[in-house]
Structure formats: structure tokens, C-alpha cells
Image: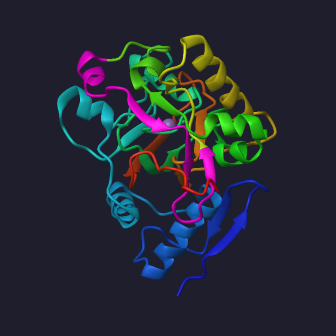
Amino acid sequence: MTQLNIEPLHDNFGARVTGVALSGDLSDSEVALIREAIDSYEFLCFPEQDMNDEKQLAFTGLLGEPEAEHVTFGKTGEIKYFGTVGNVQDDGSSLGNANTSTRYQTGNQLWHSDSSFREVPSFVSILHAYEVPGEGGATEFASMRAAYAALPDDLRRTVEPLHVLHDYVFSRSQVAPVDPNHAASLPPAMHRLVRANPANGRKNTYSGSHARSIPGWSGVDSRRLLDDLLERTTRTGEIHTHQWRAGDTVIWDNRCLLHRGTGYDADRWRRRMRQTRVVGSEKGIVPSPTGH
Ligand code: OGA
Ligand code: MN
């Protein structure tokens, strides 16, 4: 019998969880506790996990339906459930800063919510670290729930009824061209700008670098609002910086958290992490009719 131990990291969000092996036989009550912790804390780090791909996919399946990795699917139609984050290839070699794949991944240094550009965005991402750089390579997290809670009343009233288009090609083109087949597989998706967690009703804005425009608004007004929301969400001092250690398994709630990589020198360091995602349960969760 394991004893799940949850230590909050900050006032607003984040927790470190020990006393559980994610790759072990988890009981239904342990899975339920992890789900509740996701709803409450948004970000969970499980240090010192004994992980491999098979175990990670099994654990991912306990939280819901694994999401097909969109880059491979878009380019070739092949369904695979893992994305490799970092510069280490399957054959063990590592790619430097000038490599196209390394450059493409610098798109992750823009604040974003994984798969917010999909018709049904993702629920959580699960990222396990195998090799981490000696310097750099942290991942930062910012809570759109805390941001919503801190909105002035008039702005909250403005954003409440709005929708927002999320567009991967729009955001990723800022750092590198997107393969045409990949682009064709990801038309912009429309979501509510304010979402609520279905378990606890807590609301959040839903912005980030994939957020392109507010339908019906001018480009300039859309940009001003989305930039303002992003700035409010990511103000320094309100972000959590995760300094990776090999063996960390991190789960984050894409419904309400933004994240970004801080970058590292790929000519000098190796970084190898494996990511799975769980499909969200609803298309753009709508606020409750009471407005709470
Ligand atoms: C991701 C991501 C940032 C990083 O894995 O989804 O955005 O630090 N990672 O590599
Ligand atoms: Mn990401």
C-alpha cells in the first residue's frame, strides 16, 4: 500500500507528489487521487520515477485516451503516441543548434497550451525526463486560472462571452515553416475564451501563442486583447520554473496552464524527454450558466 504524498509548490498552483510509482499497478483510488490532484493543482511533478515508453503509455491510458502525436500524423498519417522532446535521436545521437528539428522545437519557447489548436484540445501532457542539460532547458508554467481570478471585473465581463481561434500554423510559422501536409491537417479551431473545470467549476482564460484572433473583432483589437491576457498570465513572479532532473515525470493540465521551454545549448548538451498526451473530454468547456 503506497502513501501518496502531495506537497504544494506555490500558493496558486503546482505540487510535488511522492510515495507512488506511476509505472506500478496503480489502484483505482490512486488514479482517482491523481485525477483530483490534476484538477486542484494543475501541475504535478513525480520525481524519481522508473519509466519507459511502455509503462508511460500504460499510465497515460489510465487517465484517458492517448492523443495521436500531430506532427507525424499530419505529415504521414501514421498514428504514434509519443513525441520526443529534446535533441537526442532514437539511435542515441544528438542534434545541434543548427539542425532543423532543433530549430523547429524552439517554437516550444513561446507560451502555449499543448494541442489548443485541435478541435478537441488535450487534457494533460505527461513528460518524462531521461537526460537533462547541465545548464538551461527548464520549462516554465503559468496558470490561466490564477490569471482569470485576478482579472478586473470589466475585463472579466468582456472576455466571458468571447470565442478565440487557435491556429498552429499561425504560431509555429513564427519560428519555422510548417510542412504543407501537416498544416493541412490542422485547420484553426474555435474555443471559448473562458473555460471552467468540469469537476470544481474553477474558470480560466484560454490563450497562449496559438491564440490567433477573436472572431468578429478587428485584427488589431484581437491582438491587443490576446497580448494583454498573455501578459497578465505570465507576469514574472507568478510563474513556476521547473528545473528538470532525470527521472522526473511531470503532468500538466493543458486546459488551464500555459508553458514554455527556456531553451538550452544543443551543441553542448543532451536533452531527452518523452511526451504523451491525453485527449480532452469536451470541445471547449463552456462556463456554467450561472456565470460562476
Ligand atoms: C512540451 C514543451 C517545452 C520544453 O514538451 O510540450 O512545450 O521545455 N516543452 O521543452
Ligand atoms: Mn508544449
Q: Which is nearer the eye, 57 or 192? A: 192
- Percent from the top left, x then y, of residue 266? 53, 25
Q: Which is nearer the eye, 173 or 4? A: 173
Q: Is residue 197 magenta?
A: yes
- Percent from the top left, x then y, of residue 194? 57, 43
Number of numbered discs overlaid on the protein picture: 0
* Colour treatment of the image: rainbow
What segment carries the magenta color? 179-204
Q: Which is nearer the eye, 153 or 138? A: 153
Q: Is residue 21 magenta?
A: no
- Residue furthest to the front: 290
- Percent from the top left, x then y, of residue 265? 59, 24
- Percent from the top left, x then y, of residue 211? 51, 27
Describe residue 5's horizontal placement relative to residue 252 as left or right. Answer: right
Describe residue 119's horizontal placement relative to residue 36 as left or right. Answer: left
Q: Is residue 27 visible?
A: no
Describe residue 85's horizontal placement relative to residue 155 as left or right. Answer: left
Which residue shows up at 59% across the image and 34% down it? Answer: 260
